[in-house]
Image (tube, helix red, strand yellow):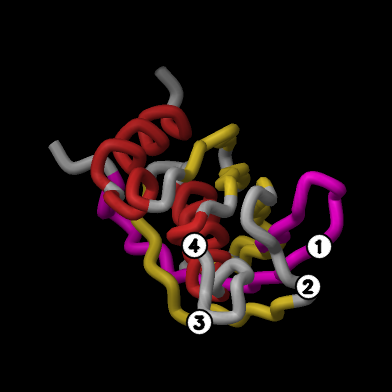
Amino acid sequence: MDTAQEVRGHIEAHDRLIGLFDMQIQEVLPGMARVSMKVGPDHLNAAGICHGGAIFSLADVAFALAVNSMGVMALALEISVNYLRPANEGTILTATAEQVHAGKSTTLFVVKVKDEASQMVAFFKATAFRLQGRSVIQS
């Protein structure tokens, strides 16, 4: 099994938010991940649309999978998100995380959250610090 798939299995087994929010991991490759979630009644805010925290969490899970996909543990230093349009109950959201820069110890990722019509719902940018010598997979 390659490293990205080992990391996927580890995170899928230990990140409880994935199951709690009913997220589906679609794909994990080195430096990239795709995760989807159908907006359900428990994802809605008081305005009756998908809560920003649920959208952020979906993007964050995709980011976590992508940034750790090479096997070296990485932790977020900074994250920003722009919410571009609402998502209603029943909408399937897909977050695609991609590495756009890899430095010696820091890395930059963007995550685009889109609905099933490929309209961008949110744009998420994250900088992470890689903990050299520390594996994501704990034995």
Q: Earlier in the sequence, mark 1 or mark 2?
A: 2
| The image quarter in which residue 48 lies | bottom right
Q: Could you tell me which secondary element the residue under label 1 belongs to?
A: strand
Dot 3 amino acid type: Glu
The quadrant of the image that shows the N terminus is top left
The location of residue 21, given as percent across then percent down, is 41, 52
Q: How far apart in space, not on screen, are marks 2 and 3 (Cα)?
A: 23 Å
Is 125 situated above or below 31? below
Cα separation between marks 2 and 4: 15 Å
Q: Amino acid at mark 1?
A: Met
Q: Which residue is mark 2?
A: 85
Query: Which numbered dot is residue 43?
Result: 4
Q: Main secondary structure of the magenta part?
A: strand
User: Which SS class for mark 3?
Assistant: strand
Estimate the spatial distance between the alpha carbons at disc 1 and disc 3, rounded to whole Å.
Answer: 21 Å
Crowding around mark 3 (Cα neighbors within 10 Å: few <14, some 14 to 19, many 20+) is few
Q: Is residue 98 visible?
A: yes
Closer to the chain start, of discs 1 and 3, is: 3
Labelled pair 2, 4 in contact (Cβ < 8 Å): no
Tag 2 secondary structure: loop
The residue at which mark 3 appears reads as 78
Task: Please name whichever residue, 90 or 94, is drawn nearer the observer in this view of the structure.
Answer: 90
- The numbered mark at residue 120 is 1
